[in-house]
Image: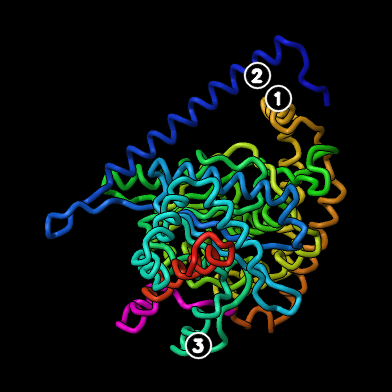
Amino acid sequence: MSRVVGPVRKGILSFFERRAAKKREMLVEEVGKLKRSLASTTEYGLRQPFTVSVVVPTFLKDRAELTGYRFEVLRNQLVELGHLLRRGIADEIIIIDGSTKSSGAIDDSLMRSIVSTMNRSVSIFHDEVDLIQKYRVMRNKAVLGLYDFGVRVVHQLDREIDRVLKMSKLLPQGLTTGKGGALWLATALSSGDVMCFVDSDIRDFEGWQVAALLKPILESWTRAERSTLYSKAYYTRLAVNLDSPEKGFYKLGGRATRLLAIPLIRALSKKGALKGLERLQYPLSGEFAGSKTLFESIEFPSGYEAEMAILIQMWKKGLVDRIAQVDLGLFQHFPQSDKAIHQMVRQIIQLVTAELAEHVNFNQELVDEYLSEAMKEIASSHSMYEKAEVRVRMQHEVKRDFYKDLEGDRNKVLAYAEELRNAVSSSTSLQKPVQRLPSWDRIGKDEQGAKLISFIRRRGIASTVELLSKQNLVSV
């Protein structure tokens, strides 16, 4: 692949880059106006603002990441989100961390680094921290969880939340690790009318991407239709070499989505299940937004099958036509290992076979249909890089060559097909329900549940204060 060279070509690219930046800035401004227009008036005549919560699930694989390039990517993301907080696009940022030590105990090193970074880089949060440090009465309120931080950082295995959930017998086994567990807890922690979730492994994250996810929801709500409940990102996803991110080449990312979810949904749709979801260009994207009430109605499984679980439950409720799609362009991310992806694939297959057993006949014919669709998807997804506009963006934004790993993709599809075949041939797999966490709308129906949700929100604030204290930013 040739490089973009020459002053003329560079000038053209610079022009398009400036034009794109201007369009993105206009998008952020437009979403800000839409959000302000959604403010309502209570029955007592008081103005009630429309609010947005942004949630970032994080996970530390190795302590070396705290001082490496991986943390720089997260730091950039936190700074970008801080700009949204300052501009009023976001009203709260919730970081929910799942880092643990080899013993299984909580590892708070990443959370401590996050609060220090936010204190240095986000002016609103810095001023809030300065205020509680300056006035004891404010500090006492913060310790009790009665101070409204714009940034909240909590562990998904938080000891106090875990204790209360066990005591209330809501979760006798306690909190769980896994992405689904993080999304479930974040739903209770947040207070926004709309929630926006973004992964923490995006190398080129920018704040306009959050605004883009919010736009279709806010637009429909300004018309009093509320026709859009959920927006999903789609993008060209490239896998970055974490060890040397500025060298080498990129490979096409999104293995679980491209090689399993997309072709499997298409195969199931032909059999009458998940109709309408086959139109989604990136069904498992970790970047999505939705109404708080939607997420409160979801029974999240604890693992990586969470995004698929949301889609299946929306399909069962007849809400597929209320999903919007948003193009976020080129995404450069840090990939997980093939072993971790295969475990994710296994979880998704278990969820799909268990949840849809009453709607479709899982047999060898379905496996063959999946294989056919998967091979088509490999050819289709790789061919996009032959398009001139994609190649120009790759050369300008990524500045390295793209490697087509067709053989690697085919081998992965064959391995995933074998997992599907094993699940289809096992009656136990089709009959065993996936363990799901109870929905928050069901929990909050009685007084005890409402008190539990209130406690969890206060605990998110108290957790943040404790982390600030550990970093010597607040004296408690």
Q: Is 75 placed above or below 293 here?
A: above
Against 229, residue 82 (above or below) is above
Report the residue that reaches farthest toward the right: 407
Q: Is the C-beta separation of discs 2 and 1 under 8 Å? A: yes
Give the side of residue 37 with respect to residue 107, left or right.
Answer: left
CA separation, marks 2 and 1?
9 Å
Would you name the residue on which mark 2 appears?
13
Q: Secondary structure at mark 3?
A: helix
Given the current orientation, which residue lies at the most extreme top position?
Answer: 8
Classify residue 189 by image quadrant.
Answer: bottom left
Amino acid marked by disc 2: Leu
Q: Which residue is mark 1?
A: 392
The residue carrying mark 3 is 166
| Of residues 366 and 251, the one drawn nearer to the viewer in this rendering | 251
Report the residue at 52% width, 61% height from top.
311
| Magenta highlight range | 435-452
